[in-house]
Image (cartoon, rainbow, N blue to C red):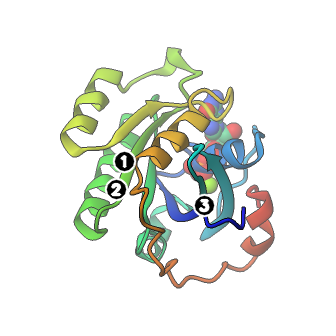
Amino acid sequence: MADGKTKHFKLVLLGNASVGKSCLVARFAKGEFYENQEPTIGAAFMTQTVNLGDFVCKFEIWDTAGQERYRALAPMYYRGASAAVVVYDIGSKESFEGAKDWVKELLDNVESITVALAGNKCDQPHSRSVSQEEVESYARENGCIFMETSAKTGHNVIEIFTEIARKLPQQTDSKQDSGGVGLADGQAKAAGGCCG
Ligand code: GDP
Ligand code: MG
């Protein structure tokens, strides 16, 4: 839309390795799911829009690598972000602990960021080790959006991004600085594909 009704927002995905960040982005941006999603190296970039009627919200999405050795790079990706999706695996308490660290880091460092917690892999209720109630109260205390999602089935994937779009300040455009990061080697192609 070139009618001025498209608003751009920088969004960053954060969370431990293997919780399903790249799969959530692939599901959201392309409607696809990869059983053998390859680990993300550095970060991957993608865009997707949500039409809210009054305006179109275009997300500029940075999907980061969850491995500890990339942790120091995270500020490059969340700097200036309007929103973050912090992902954990409902089958991993450790990943929820990691998610809480990310939420704290974001709230301490990024002004007026909209944070959404995604409890992913909810298609595997048999391996659940994080209760929905626990995360609900944590999310309430910290002003986060919270949904349990499944990149595999698509459950709540469009919904969580739409909820973020609704919550973003509607009158202003995304902050200008989109982080000052270039596409990492080998990720430029993955930008369209996400699985590299
Ligand atoms: P990332 O490291 O956080 O980016 O995680 P990936 O997106 O690479 O996913 C890690 C693994 O979890 C892959 O084998 C995916 O197929 C699997 N996975 C991701 N999302 C889901 C989900 O919602 N349900 C199930 N059952 N598996 C998932
Ligand atoms: Mg990944």
The single residue placed furthest to the left in the displayed view is: 141
Q: Mark 1: is the Cβ under 8 angstroms from ligand 1?
A: no
Please give the residue where the numbered disc 3 appears in the rendered image: 5
The quarter of the picture where the C terminus appears is bottom right
Camera-nearest residue between 194 and 69: 194
Say which element carries label 1.
Answer: helix
What is the three-letter code of the residue carrying label 2?
A: Trp
Residue ID at (65%, 61%): 40
Q: Earlier in the sequence, mark 3 or mark 2?
A: 3
Q: Residues within 10 Å of mark 3 (few under 14, many from 20)?
A: few
Camera-nearest residue between 144 and 164: 164
Indicate left or right for 111 with 157 as reference.
left
Asked if the residues shown at circle 1 and circle 2 are in contact, with their CB atoms under 8 angstroms apart, the answer is yes
Residue ID at (60%, 43%): 53
Q: What's the CA distance linking mark 3 and mark 2?
A: 32 Å
Indicate left or right for 25 with 120 as reference.
right
Q: Quadrant of ligand 2?
A: bottom right
The picture places residue 30, in percent across and down from the top left corner, at: 77, 46
The picture places residue 4, in percent across and down from the top left corner, at: 62, 67
Please give the residue where the numbered disc 2 appears in the rendered image: 102
Q: Mark 3: is the Cβ under 8 angstroms from ligand 2?
A: no
What is the three-letter code of the residue carrying label 3?
A: Lys
Asked if the residues shown at circle 3 and circle 2 are in contact, with their CB atoms under 8 angstroms apart, the answer is no
The circle on residue 112 is none
The circle on residue 99 is 1
Asked if the residues shown at circle 3 and circle 1 are in contact, with their CB atoms under 8 angstroms apart, the answer is no
